[in-house]
Image (spheres, rainbow, N blue to C red):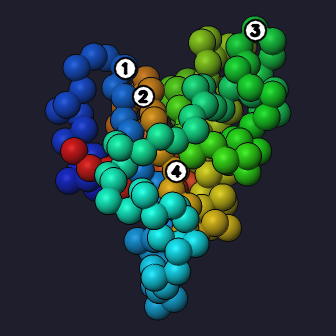
Amino acid sequence: RYNEAMWTPLVRTATRASMGLLVLLTTLASCGDDEPDFDDPALRCNGLEVLCDRTVDQVVFVRTHNSHASEDAGYGAVNWNHYRGIPRQLEDGVRSLNVDIYHEEGETVLCHGLCDFARQPAVEAFAEITAFLRANRFELVLLDLQNETTLEHTVTAFEDSGLSRYAHVQI
């Protein structure tokens, strides 16, 4: 299950205890026999021809910080950043998400600040992203992980939620 070749280079590049990972999530790599028609302008380059020759780092994405910390997900006034949870953010056009991932009391969770105030199982939040990608085959989502746990816990949450199927990590 744990693919060391995919994740280990990220560990070597981390320069602090809380490792930040940026993961590109897309469904295009798993289209199978139903290949998209990339000559269709609506599918190519997110519908904007000017983006066709740009790399991901040359495109601006709408992003939310601590995307998981929402009133919808049960966070309170002390530590929420958004009214709406990740599913609604994705529906509204957000394509870059930032989450803080911890391992607390035997479970991999997303927290903002102290996990005692509120937490969401990482598998649950990642499953919400997975559902969006399954329903929107030609979308791309950037996921920025503030990783406050081991890489193995993070990878397990990706695998258990189905999100690892859509992940592309590149150094």
Amino acid type of the residue that numbered disc 2 sits on in the rendered structure = Asn
Amino acid type of the residue that numbered disc 1 sits on in the rendered structure = Ser
Amino acid type of the residue that numbered disc 4 sits on in the rendered structure = Val
Image marks 1 and 4: residues in contact by CB distance under 8 Å: no
Q: Which mark is residue 92?
A: none
In primary-sequence order, the first of circles 2 and 1 is: 1
Q: Position of residue 81 (x, y in %)?
A: 70, 20
| Nearest to viewer (mark 4 / mark 3) | 4
Q: Identify the residue position indicated by label 3 in the image.
A: 78
Residue 104 can be seen, yes or no: yes
Q: Which mark is residue 18?
A: 1
Q: Which mark is residue 147?
A: 2
Image marks 2 and 1: residues in contact by CB distance under 8 Å: yes
The residue lying toward the viewer, choosing from 7 and 61, is: 61
Q: Quadrant of the N terminus?
A: bottom left
Count how many numbered circles sit on residues in the image.
4
Secondary element at tag 3: loop
Image marks 4 and 3: residues in contact by CB distance under 8 Å: no
Residue 18 located left or right of residue 42: left
In primary-sequence order, the first of circles 1 and 4 is: 1
Image marks 3 and 1: residues in contact by CB distance under 8 Å: no
Q: Position of residue 59 (x, y in %)?
A: 42, 45
Q: Identify the residue position indicated by label 4 in the image.
A: 141
Q: Quadrant of the C terminus?
A: top left
Q: Residues within 10 Å of mark 3 (few under 14, many from 20)?
A: few
